Amino acid sequence: MRKKKVRVYALSTCGWCRKTVGWLKENNIAAEVIYTDVIEDEAEKEKVVACAKKYNPLLSFPTVVIDNGEHVIIGFAPEKIREALKK
């Protein structure tokens, strides 16, 4: 089975984001976690937010993007993440 690329757009102050990242770690799922609220460079922050909005126009957190948008899961949804990783 091919390894999936997982990216999480999150806020450092978000409890559901912490739960999602924690669940990924507990299940040994490698993920790139981007905390959008702690990016100091404004140009970089705008770029990251625009990218996140491409997958989730409402920009709610966490937003889990698997394989560059093949699957997008919004909120803490471990079963949906697990299912998407199986496909």
Image (spheres, rainbow, N blue to C red):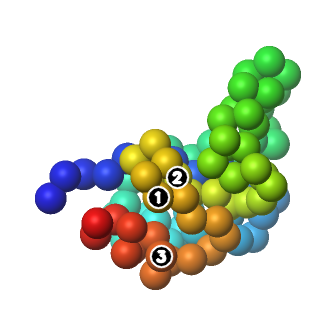
- Give how far apart the Cα atoms at labels 1 and 3 are: 9 Å
Which residue is depicted at the point 75% across and 70% down? 15
Mark sitting on residue 80: 3
Which residue was labeled with disc 1? 71
Lateral position of residue 81 relative to residue 57, left or right: left
Helix, strand or loop at disc 2?
strand
Nearer-the-camera pick, 35 or 62: 62
Specify which label sits upstream in the sequence, 1 or 3.
1
Considering every residue shown, the one lying at the far bottom of the view is 79
Which residue was labeled with disc 2? 65
Specify which label sits upstream in the sequence, 2 or 3.
2
* Amino acid carrying mark 2 in the image: Val
- Give how far apart the Cα atoms at labels 2 and 3 are: 12 Å
On the image, the x and y values in percent for residue 28 come to 34, 64
Rendered position, 43 above or below 5:
above
Circles 1 and 3: CB distance less than 8 Å? no
* Amino acid carrying mark 3 in the image: Lys
Residue 14, by quadrant, is: bottom right
Specify which label sits upstream in the sequence, 2 or 1.
2
Rendered position, 38 above or below 13:
above
On the image, the x and y values in percent for residue 44 come to 73, 22
On the image, the x and y values in percent for residue 51 come to 66, 35
Circles 2 and 1: CB distance less than 8 Å? yes
From the image, state whether disc 1 or disc 3 is nearer to you.
1
Which residue is depicted at the point 52% across and 52% down? 65
Which residue is depicted at the point 72% across and 26% down? 47
Tell me if mark 2 has few (under 14), some (14-19) or many (20+) residues whose alpha carbon lies within 10 angstroms of its own: many
- Quadrant location of the C terminus? bottom left
Lateral position of residue 40 relative to residue 20, left or right: right
Helix, strand or loop at disc 3?
helix
